[in-house]
Amino acid sequence: MGMMLKLSAGAALIVAFGCAKPHLSPMGTTKPGGILLNIAQMDGTVRELMKRAKVPGLAMAIIQDGVVVRATTFGMADQEKQRPLKPDTIMYGASLTKAAFAYMTMQLVDEGVVDLDAPVTRLLKRPLPEYNEFADLAQDERWRRITPRMLLSHSSGLLNWRWINDDEKLDIKFEPGTRYVYSGEGIQLLQLIVEERTGQSVQALMQARVFDRFHMKRTSMIWRDDFTDSTSIGYGIDGAALPHKQRKTPRAAGSMDTTLADYASFVAGFLRGEGLSDSSRREMQRAQTRIVSPQQFPSHFPGETSVNDGIKLSCGLGWVVYESPLGPALFKEGNDDGTNNFVLAFPKSKTAVVLLSNSSRADQIYFPLVEALFGPTCLPWFWMGYIPFDRPELRAPGARAHPVAPCGETVTSAAR
């Protein structure tokens, strides 16, 4: 089962769910993880995909050998005002915040301020349920076993957000340390730990340790008034405009405003290994928790699949990691209404693509786009929910029961 996208600008791409035929170009390289398209092909591919999926704006940066070699934008930041998207346009980072926060936390691990494997009983001044935000856990002693490693690898058992529950109360869905369950609540718990251990706000920590280090002058954990005239408008799945939210409270799970140029600078620095010990950088990229859920969201739902075992899909610390045809790969998404962001990186070659969009529809083009850029990647697009725009049946109710393998095999009986 596959699909063919006939692209303009002289480029033709056949995507068969992980079986694109690579071709070299002036921008390309034979190094694993190299870019296969020249600039004209790249731009033509992006514009054609955006047109077919009705994506109003997309920002894209290419990193090679740990250096940002291209940062460019397509479409509009504000369609009504016909204001074009630019590399310095303020965009909502959403959960890309988590990867930057994980990097900062690992600096504290290097310095002995945070112990990855210490339980929260040793890291906090008071028992966790005595903090108002976590009072719901008072009757579940399993909170005592949660560690920073579990929080960064999304294996604490906490669900994503408490409001998902019918009673809107926080609970632990699985035994801590046993299963991947994506958890914004878990990252907020780690924020509490970090702030107590350092005596500083996460806003101050991120500014000093991440944003200043990588010259991210237009990135902030909270809204800044100087962003007003250069923010992007978001666009929902129906194309309706969504105003840019002005977040007043810093949240490690996702309050960051940033730009393409700034976030690409962070990713490039991370791939170069700046600011971390070799051991901490390796630990972030090492498989910590095997992922067995049929799809990432909602990952606390019951059911398991082995469909992604071939690529060893796992969670590292702050990133999801897997084995691709191009070597070890890691990625992070950041999604919200009117926002779709994605970073895919290959650490050995220090190559990456950074994609920021002001559209809820952009995730429908990210898989075919990365296949065009890199050739076969075995990106676990079905697990991610990155269903291509011309395969709407895979978004239908019940599709979760029939996971699609990342490298071309359709599995109809793996979910159970």
Image: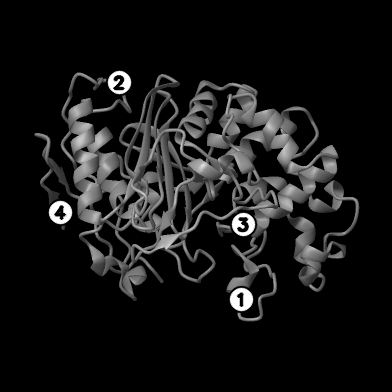
Is residue 17 at least partly visible in the picture?
Answer: no
At mark 2, the secondary structure is: loop
Most extreme residue toward the front is 81
Q: Considering depth in this image, is 62 or 203 the residue closer to the camera?
A: 203
Residue at x-position 76% and y-position 61%? 143
Q: Amino acid at mark 1?
A: Asn
Is disc 4 in contact with disc 1, using a CB cutoff of under 8 Å? no
The amino acid type, in three-letter code, at marker 4 is Met
Q: Which quarter of the figure has residue 280? A: top right
- Foreground label between 3 and 2: 3
Dot 3: few (<14), some (14–19), or many (≥20) neighbours within 10 Å? many
- The amino acid pointed to by label 3 is Gly
Query: Dot 4 corresponds to which residue?
Result: 3
Instruction: Work out whether mark 4 precedes mark 1 in sequence or the reverse, and give the earlier one.
Output: 4
Dot 1: few (<14), some (14–19), or many (≥20) neighbours within 10 Å? few
Q: Is residue 403 left or right of residue 313?
A: left
Find disc 1 in the rendering and name its residue.
165
Disc sitting over residue 295 in the figure: none
Mark 3 highlights which residue? Answer: 184
Task: Using the numbered discs, state the Cα–Cα distance from disc 3 to disc 1 in whole angstroms.
Answer: 14 Å
Alpha carbon of mark 1 to alpha carbon of mark 2: how far?
47 Å
- Estimate how packed mark 4 is, as few (under 14), some (14 to 19) or many (20 or more) residues with alpha carbons within 10 Å: some
Q: Is residue 305 above or below residue 256?
A: below
The mark that comes first in sequence, 1 or 2, is 2
| Amino acid type indicated by mark 2 | Lys
